[in-house]
Image: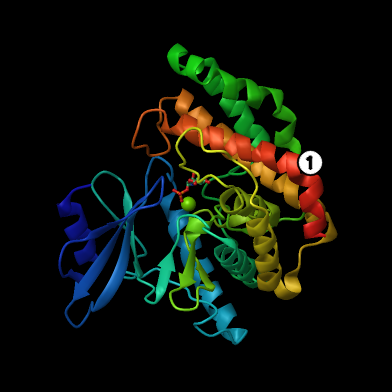
Amino acid sequence: MTPGDLAGVLSAFGVEPRGAPEPVGGGHINQAWRITGAGPRSAGRFLLQRLNPAVFPDATAVLENCALVSAHLGHAARAAGWDEGRWRVAEPLRTPEGRLGVPDDRGAWWRLFPWLEGTRAILEAADAAEAHAVGTAFGRFHALMARYDGPPLQSPLPGFHDTPARLRRFEAALAGADPGRAQAAAAEVTFVLEHRGWAEALAGAGLPLAVAHNDAKAANVLLDASSGAGVAVVDLDTVMPGLRLHDVGDLLRSVVGTAAEDAPAGVPVEVDRARFRALVAGLKAGLGGEALTAAERELFVPAGMVLCYEQGIRFLGDYLEGDRYYRTSRAGQNLDRARVQLQLAAALVAARGELEPLVR
Ligand code: GN1
Ligand code: MG
């Protein structure tokens, strides 16, 4: 991406920028900037995003899903009488010709959102209060999406949480791995192969399909800057038919571990009980009348195990393939990321007996 791309895309959206674009970090895949607009037609601030074409080959599906889902999240919240202290949505903006995205000459698509003023992003849930806010926001998201009645959503990344398929791809990556990397990752590879059965825990459970977010993590929630409440769920790129438990599992993955996803090697990974309790309470409050079913409550903790295991094999597989998918800033980072995930999966299994009564 060049400054020329940025300027061209902003002008296609009719935005006249003031000052330099500010990079917005956090994601592993796409790139984003905060833009301050000038002039009568583009006052205010915006989030500009470039979709990674290697990860999202079907950008149209991503752009269209995002427009449908955010429009629904807006009017369903208004219909329920929710004010801005409870729910916020950034609906994607269109060009003057009505297009949701603008391509650059390298085949990447760009899109623009209004910046949600008065909110703040977090990378991880730092304490029980943030864990509660994250649970509440995703609970509200599911309560609203349960009433989705718009055109059918597309599946931009089919099989996204098909953990058994991800395990097969991991084994293919292992077979073709660079010997040095395979050697460095030997302990983690053994762990993955010894726990192959974990991949099946949700796949065979016969749970009903819902509209799931599929990247349900603390970093995809915005908090109200003054109250600290969880008021928005962002990053709608992977919203598509899936299981609510995929989101529950991802929430456990990102909220209850004592080590951050990008923690340096050696940080102990345990389940933080206070954050676990707060996440459960927040989810329950947010879901309201769309409470989890008995079958979902039964598989609540295993869902965390599955999603940590799945994320672990994705990071480890990417390490074995030479760090092609997840952006890295240092050598061995995807291997360290995999270790955190696999240790958290094991910690959830070990604590299951103690955690399950808190969910029932
Ligand atoms: C990726 O780029 P980001 O942070 O939104 C990934 C998720 C992973 C996540 C790990 C499309 O999301 O599946 O869970 O990293 N998104 C895609 O933090 O692969
Ligand atoms: Mg994402």
Residue at position x 32%, y 48% in the image: 108
Figure quadrant of residue 163: top right
Q: Which residue is mark 1?
A: 204
Q: Is residue 314 visible?
A: no
How far across and down, in percent of the image, does residue 190 sit? 63, 20
Q: Secondary structure at mark 1?
A: loop
Q: Could you tell me which residue is drawn at 70 percent across and 28 percent down?
A: 196
Is 113 left or right of 72, judged from the image as shown? left
Q: Which is more toward the observer, 256 or 51?
A: 256
Q: Is residue 163 left or right of residue 78?
A: right
Choose between 100 and 227: the one closer to the eye.
Answer: 227
Q: Please state if 177 lies on the left or on the right of 248 as rendered.
A: left
Q: Is residue 298 above or below residue 73?
A: above
The quarter of the picture where residue 44 lies is bottom left
Residue 285: name its quadrant. bottom right
Q: Amino acid at mark 1?
A: Gly
- Residue 251 position, x and y percent, is 61, 54
* In-front residue for pair 294/279: 279
From this viewpoint, is residue 339 visible?
Answer: yes
Residue depicted at 41% across the width and 30% down the height: 323
Drawn side of residue 106 relative to residue 173, left or right: left
